[in-house]
Image (tube, helix red, strand yellow):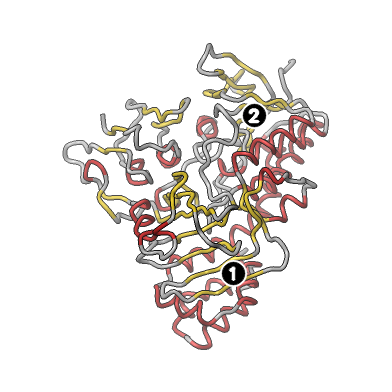
Amino acid sequence: MPIEINHSRCIQCIGCASVCPVGAIELIGLRMVFHPEKCISCGACAKACPANAIKFIPKAGVKK
Amino acid sequence: MKYDYDVIIVGAGPSGSTISRILAQNGMEVMVFDKRKELGEPIRCGEGLGAREVISQGLDIPRSCVSTDIKGAKVISPDGSSIVWKSKETTGWVLERKMFDKWLMEQAVHKGAKVQSYTRVFDLVKKDGKIQGVKVSHADHEPYEVSAPLVVSAEGMEATLARKAGFRAFSSLYDVDTCYQYEMQEYDHENLIELYFGTKSSPRGYVWIFPKNDKKANVGIGIGAHLETGVKEGGIKGATPKDYLDRFIANHPQLKNASKLQDTGGIISVSAAIDSFAKDNFMVTATAARQVDPIHGGGIAMAMEGGLLAASTIMKAHKANDYSEKMLKEYETAWRNTLGKKVAKRLLLRKVMEAASDEDFNYIFKTINQDDLDQVMKGNFAGPVAKVVAGRPQLMGLLKALISSRETV
């Protein structure tokens, strides 16, 4: 899993979804839902998150 | 073919409400789906709205939707000096956004539009390659299909369906600010919007204080999301607006002792609009199309003004029974010729703000006065620029884009 969402920190602002180039995160109900099969490990969601609620786990060999 | 509705609108924010109100008023059958459990929640914005848009649409906003009147603005430079721009009349309001969104949608329902909350639109329905409706699920129950010859995305920043329809409705990190905001109390304000600039305290952005009733205020910050100002979870470098905001508050003589009533946050678009708003049987409006003010990312006014343009094209398409891209592009042309030009000017101003150093800000704010600021707000840059450059010619390089803008926009 390239990212982990900390739902206690998340404020459902949908910022991560707005910058994800492949639509791998969306708000469903009252929770951000991550679709790992779409993720390209770019880290944009984690960089943009205003609440620092996304832990990015880079793939081996990918620059942080 | 018989459709369930004339138009399906996705999203019951200010854009969806405005468009559905006008269409229903003109006899069209409109269905609005919103995925939120309750319209208006969660709030993701500073809640400011100028008076002009509301007056032009003949809307009489009830006091319950308004937190306080705005009488002007105060701009504070990095060294603490400020310019105040005050008006005798109310220039706008800080809304109770939750109440306002719901109220605006109620106005559409009064005119005959239908709305359904907690309903997620998760896919398009296509027949013979043409968009003919949407697949929805209410409260995560059994999905079903709803048909219409036109689907309008008024989805806001996330724009999930617009992306499914093939629009590039997402933002690069550079094109957004990442924001954090507290509703705070008590703060003695003068009903002015306060904006604090400083490359150290709010890199590529600013801190805002929006006054609210009962000595409350929305205190927030937006900084460039592409910046790597801190180390985030997992060790990745990224922008940390909350840290900056907490620092600002800790150093603010009044706010450091104030309470926090609410946390909000979000991402605002500070770029130009997306490159296309329409295709056969589908339209993208307002924030979903990044039709926002690129200085503050505000989208309410733009959604309401743009909503008029969108509705006018939709009525024409309905009358002609022609929902082709060619027909729907009329809306895009109208937008680019009016609101688009305003946005282009604001974008130039934004670029200057982005490139300015703290010393530049200090000098500019000491040199221009309330009248100059008034001109800048109206998009007339020549006078104020001449004044600044007269005393500090080295700023010409930075500011010349503003005055040569007339031909390009």
Q: How packed is label 1: few (under 14 Cα within 10 Å), some, or many (20 or more)?
A: some
- Badge 2 amino acid: Val
**What residue lies at 40% left-to-right and 58% top-to-bottom?**
B257
B52 to the left or right of B40: right
In the rendering, at what x and y percent does residue B356 appear?
A: 43, 71
The span from disc 1 to disc 2 (Cα, nearest Å) is: 36 Å
Q: Count up the numbered dots.
A: 2
| Relative depth, front residue between B334 and B256 | B256
Q: Which residue is mark 2?
A: B151
In the rendering, at what x and y percent does residue B164 appear?
A: 51, 30
Q: Which residue is mark 1?
A: B405
B38 to the left or right of A57: right
Image mark for residue A23:
none
In the rendering, at what x and y percent does residue B147 appear?
A: 66, 19
**What residue lies at 51% left-to-right and 74% top-to-bottom?**
B82
Q: Chain of mark 2?
A: B
B225 to the left or right of B409: left
Q: Earlier in the sequence, mark 1 or mark 2?
A: 2
Q: Chain of mark 1?
A: B
- Badge 1 amino acid: Ser
Q: Is residue B114 above or below residue A59?
A: above
| Relative depth, front residue between B239 and B94 | B94
Of helix, strand and loop, which one carries label 1?
Answer: helix
| Relative depth, front residue between B342 and B236 | B236
Q: Is residue B321 above or below residue B46?
A: above
